[in-house]
Image (spheres, rainbow, N blue to C red):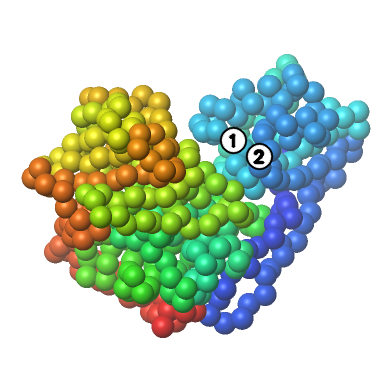
C-alpha cells in the first residue's frame, strides 16, 4: 500500500506588493516528493490554474472513470464548487500509470484519497498550519482604482474586497480622481507549502477630492470608522456596483463609467447595454414592467418612507417581478435603452415621503455603532493596524 504522500510546494509567484520599504517578490521553492522512496511509485504535483477539475486531470491523461470516482468522494467533503484557481494537487502513480493516491489542497485544507484493495478511494482530511504575514500597500489613482491596483500586481480578489469595504460610502466607478490616495493593510495566511490559504484587509484608507478621507478598520464581523461607527448604511452608494462591473467586463479593458447629471428627478448612469444593475437597499418590488418613456421600469419600496426606481432597463433579472423581496446588492436587471432613451443608460431615482430627493446628498445613519465594551475593545484592537496604516505608502 502506498505510504502517506506529503504534498510539497508548487510553483507560486508571490504577489509583488508595494511595501513601505522596498521588498523583492519572493519565489517559493518548488518540489514534489514521495517520502521513503517506495519502489514503483512517482509523484507529480501542480496547480489548478482556473481550469475545471475534469479538464485538468484529463489533460494529465487520467481516465474519466477515475476522475469521476475522485470527484464523487471529494464533493461531499469540500462542500462547494472546486477547484479554485491556485488549489494544489499531487498524484502518486505506479510504474504502470495506476493512481495510488491523490492529494488536493484548497486553502488550509488537505484532502488525501487513497486507493483501497477493493478498488475504491478512501478519504482522509487535515488542516495545514497557517502562518500570518502582513503587508502595507498603497499608492495614488492614475485612471481608475482597478488599473492603479492591478498595475501593482494586486490580485483581483483583493481589489474587489477593497472596493466592497466602501460600497456604502464611495462609488469607485465615478468618484475617483487622478491623484487620490489609497492604502490598506493586507493580512495573508500562508501554509507551509507556500500556498495562500486566506487574505483579508484589516485596515484601509481612501482619500480623494470627491470623497474626503475615509479610514476603515475590521473588527469582529465588519468595518468601522475610527470612532466605532459602522460603514454599512441602508443604501449602497450607487446601483452600478464596482464588483459587478469589474466581474462583468474584462478588467484589462475596463474604463470608468461616466455619470451624467441631468435636470430631472433622478441620476443617469451611462453604461454599456447589459451592465448588471443592483438594488441599492433591501426592499420589495412594487412594479416591474413597461412604463411609457421609462421603458422597462422597476420600482421598489425600501422600508420606511423610501422608494427607489430604475428605468430604461434592457431586461429584468431572473425571478424579479412584483412582490419579489430583494436584498441589498442583488442584481435586479440590466442596463438598456428601452423607452425614450438616446443610448444605453440607467435612470435611477429615489423618493422620500412621496417626494424626489437628491440621492447623492442623503446622509443615512450607520447600520450599527459600537458601544460600551465593544467600543472599548475596538479602540484597543485597532491601535496596531492604525499605526501600520499611517506608515503605508501614499497614506499621507
Q: Are marks 1 and 2 in contact (CB under 8 Å)?
A: yes
Q: Residues within 10 Å of mark 2 (few under 14, many from 20)?
A: many
Residue depth check, mark 1 versus mark 2: number of the one nearer the observer: 1
Left or right: 236, with 113 as reference point: left
Q: Earlier in the sequence, mark 1 or mark 2?
A: 1
Q: Percent from the top left, x then y, of residue 128?
A: 58, 50
Residue 389 seen in the current view? yes
Q: Residues within 10 Å of mark 1 (few under 14, many from 20)?
A: some
Q: Which residue corresponds to the image point at 57% horizontal and 82% vertical from the top-left?
A: 21
Q: Residue furthest left?
A: 353
Q: Which residue is mark 2?
A: 104
Q: Secondary structure at mark 2?
A: strand
Give the vertical position of 306 relative to 381 (above or below).
above
Residue 127 seen in the current view? no
Query: Which numbered marker is on residue 82?
Result: 1
Query: Which numbered marker is on residue 270?
Result: none
Q: Percent from the top left, x then y, of residue 66?
A: 74, 23
Residue closer to the observer: 136 or 298: 298
Give the vertical position of 35 relative to 178 (above or below).
above
Quarter of the picture holding the N terminus = top right
User: Which quadrant would residue 62 be assigned to in this image?
Assistant: top right
Q: Which residue corresponds to the image point at 62% horizontal and 22% vertical from the top-left?
A: 72
Count of numbered circles on the image: 2
Left or right: 296, with 73 as reference point: left
Q: Percent from the top left, x then y, of residue 102?
A: 72, 34
Q: Which residue corresponds to the image point at 15% horizontal and 62% vertical from the top-left?
A: 371
Quarter of the picture holding the C terminus = bottom left
Q: Which residue corresponds to the image point at 81% horizontal and 34% vertical from the top-left?
A: 60
User: Which quadrant would residue 309 be assigned to in this image?
Assistant: top left
Amino acid at each position: 500500500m502506498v505510504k502517506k504522500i506529503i504534498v510539497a510546494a508548487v510553483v507560486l509567484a508571490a504577489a509583488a506588493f508595494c511595501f513601505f520599504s522596498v521588498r523583492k517578490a519572493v519565489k517559493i521553492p518548488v518540489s514534489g516528493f514521495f517520502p521513503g522512496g517506495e519502489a514503483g511509485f512517482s509523484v507529480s504535483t501542480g496547480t489548478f490554474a482556473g481550469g475545471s477539475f475534469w479538464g485538468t486531470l484529463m489533460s494529465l491523461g487520467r481516465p474519466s472513470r477515475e476522475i469521476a470516482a475522485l470527484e464523487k468522494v471529494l464533493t461531499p467533503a469540500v462542500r462547494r464548487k472546486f477547484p479554485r484557481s491556485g488549489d494544489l494537487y499531487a498524484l502518486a502513480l505506479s510504474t504502470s500509470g495506476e493512481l495510488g493516491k491523490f492529494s488536493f489542497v484548497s486553502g488550509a485544507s488537505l484532502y488525501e484519497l487513497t486507493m483501497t484493495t477493493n478498488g475504491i478511494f478512501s478519504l482522509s482530511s487535515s488542516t495545514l498550519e497557517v502562518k500570518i504575514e502582513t503587508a502595507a500597500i498603497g499608492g495614488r489613482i492614475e485612471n481608475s482604482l482597478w488599473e492603479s491596483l492591478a498595475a501593482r500586481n494586486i490580485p483581483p480578489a483583493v481589489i474587489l474586497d477593497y472596493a466592497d469595504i466602501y460600497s456604502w460610502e464611495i462609488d469607485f466607478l465615478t468618484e475617483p480622481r487622478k491623484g487620490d490616495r489609497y492604502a490598506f493593510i493586507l493580512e495573508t495566511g500562508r501554509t507551509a507549502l507556500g500556498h495562500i490559504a486566506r487574505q483579508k484587509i484589516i485596515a484601509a484608507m481612501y482619500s480623494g477630492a470627491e470623497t474626503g478621507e475615509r479610514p476603515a478598520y475590521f473588527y469582529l464581523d465588519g468595518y468601522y470608522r475610527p470612532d466605532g461607527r459602522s460603514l454599512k448604511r441602508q443604501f449602497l452608494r450607487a446601483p452600478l456596483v464596482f464588483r459587478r462591473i469589474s466581474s462583468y467586463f474584462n478588467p484589462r479593458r475596463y474604463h470608468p463609467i461616466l455619470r451624467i447629471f441631468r435636470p430631472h428627478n433622478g441620476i443617469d448612469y451611462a453604461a454599456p447595454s447589459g451592465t448588471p444593475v443592483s438594488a441599492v437597499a433591501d426592499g420589495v418590488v412594487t412594479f416591474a414592467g413597461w412604463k411609457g418613456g421609462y421603458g422597462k421600469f422597476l420600482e421598489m419600496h425600501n422600508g420606511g418612507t423610501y422608494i427607489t426606481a430604475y428605468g430604461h432597463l434592457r431586461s429584468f433579472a431572473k425571478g424579479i417581478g412584483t412582490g419579489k423581496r430583494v436584498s441589498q446588492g442583488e442584481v435586479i436587471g440590466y442596463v438598456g435603452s428601452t423607452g425614450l432613451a438616446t443610448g444605453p443608460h440607467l435612470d435611477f431615482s429615489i423618493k422620500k415621503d412621496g417626494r424626489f430627493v437628491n440621492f447623492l446628498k442623503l446622509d443615512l445613519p450607520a447600520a450599527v455603532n459600537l458601544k460600551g465594551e465593544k467600543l472599548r475593545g475596538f479602540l484597543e484592537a485597532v491601535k496596531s493596524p492604525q499605526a501600520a496604516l499611517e506608515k503605508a505608502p501614499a497614506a499621507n
